[in-house]
Image: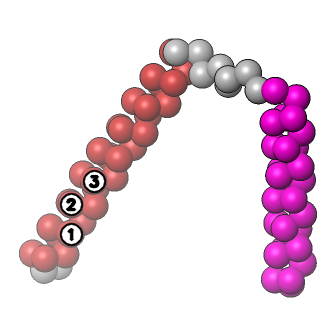
Amino acid sequence: MSLQSIINTLTRMVSRRALNWGINKGIDRIAKSGGKPAKVSSKQAKDMRTAVKRARQAARLTRRIGR
């Protein structure tokens, strides 16, 4: 095993642990603050539901095309 591959392996290990640490800290901070969604009006809620419906339809369509 060459020195370059050892350095690459160690760099990947350290960066992966640092990234996971940062993600976990962010998730913990949101969880402690309650992470409650903001109140939305009925029109916004309806628009979000239709957007989710379209996204699900698009996902189904792409899975069907991918077969």
CA separation, marks 2 and 1?
A: 5 Å
The reply to whether dot 2 and dot 1 touch (C-beta < 8 Å) is yes
Disc 3 from disc 1: Cα separation: 10 Å
Q: Is residue 44 toward the left or the right of residue 1 in the image?
A: right
Give the labeled residue for mark 3: 15
Q: Is residue 29 left or right of residue 40?
A: left
Residue 9 quadrant: bottom left
Q: Distance between the residues labelled 2 and 3?
A: 6 Å
Span colored in magenta = 41-67
- Residue 13: percent from left, percent from top: 28, 55
Residue corresponding to mark 1: 8
* Secondary structure type for disc 1: helix
Q: Does the magenta stretch include residue 14?
A: no
Amino acid type, label 2: Thr
Q: Which dot, 3 or 1, sits closer to the camera?
A: 3
Amino acid type at circle 3 is Ser
Residue 11: numbered disc: 2
Indicate the amino acid at tag 1: Asn
Question: Percent from the top left, x then y, of residue 19?
Answer: 35, 47
